[in-house]
Amino acid sequence: MGRLSGSPTVQTLALMLVVSLLYWGVRTLAGFLPVVTGASLFVLGPWFPSAPWTLVTSVYAHAGVGHLVANAITLAFAGLLLERSTTTVRYHTFFLATGILAGLSQVVLNGGGGVLGASGAIFALIGYIVTANPISEVALSRLRLTRGVQVVVFAVLAVVVTVLTGGPGVALYAHFAGLLVGLVAGRLHVLEPSTPASERSATSQYRV
């Protein structure tokens, strides 16, 4: 039990549940008290300069049970794999930072409207795993691509994955931004404790 409570993934899942329940409660209350709005407290939108807390709450709040469950399942797989190769502080910082960046990308590029959910941050975790594992490390090293070319390749990959996983009501820009940042961050190994490049293949915890 102690081990689970110390897992940053489990902590994030719990936070997602609590914040989502609060959002649903406030949203329900808003039906009786119009002065109360869930959007002003939880949804990230063009109004965020006057409601800066939504930069954080929007990452963990979800629109409904289905939205929460889908993201929770994906996070459980990706997060539990990634957390073995980083620290709790780095994990939470990366998750929140990429979630905020993904949300802002959606708001700015979509031309308005609000955004909720952790999918942008989860896509960042997935992108990190894709490029930080030993197989990708060896493959990219052998290709001898410049960092600029690698970023272009990652951007193209992010576009393809975003389009393939898109659908009605899906925050495509958030998914794209999260995945791209994750791919680049994984290549730079930003979540790993300082380790010489020559030792990464031996110390990496990513296994399939």
Image (cartoon, rainbow, N blue to C red):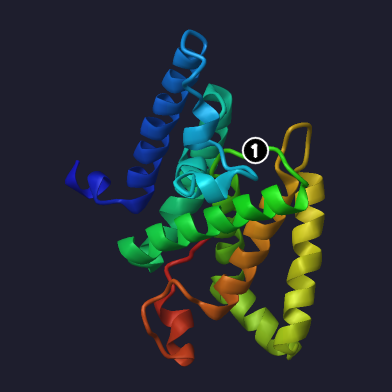
Looking at the image, which is closer to me, 204 or 91? 91
Q: Is residue 23 left or right of residue 8?
A: right
- Give the image quarter of residue 127: bottom right
Q: Is residue 167 above or below residue 203?
A: above
* Residue 120 coordinates in the image, percent (x, y): 60, 50
Looking at the image, which is closer to me, 16 or 111? 111
The reply to whether residue 135 is in sight is no
Q: Quadrant of the N terminus?
A: top left
* Residue 110 coordinates in the image, percent (x, y): 77, 47
Q: Is residue 151 left or right of residue 178?
A: right
The reply to whether residue 198 is in sight is yes
Query: Residue drawn at (39%, 26%), measured in percent from left and top?
Result: 22
- Give the image quarter of residue 179: bottom right
Q: Secondary structure at mark 1?
A: loop
* Residue 113 coordinates in the image, percent (x, y): 70, 38
Q: Is residue 38 above or below residue 188?
A: above
Query: Residue drawn at (38%, 45%), measured in percent from left and top?
Result: 12
Looking at the image, which is closer to me, 86 or 151? 151
Q: Is residue 174 left or right of residue 28?
A: right
Q: Is residue 104 above or below residue 36?
A: below
Q: Which residue is mark 1?
A: 114
- Give the image quarter of residue 16: top left
* Residue 168 coordinates in the image, percent (x, y): 78, 31
Query: How crowded is the residue under tag 1: few (<14 C-alpha within 10 Å), some, or many (20+)?
Result: many
Q: How many marks?
A: 1
Look at label 1 and name its amino acid: Gly
Query: Residue drawn at (44%, 46%), measured in percent from left and top?
Result: 53
Q: Is residue 172 above or below residue 124?
A: above
Give the farthest residue toward the top: 32
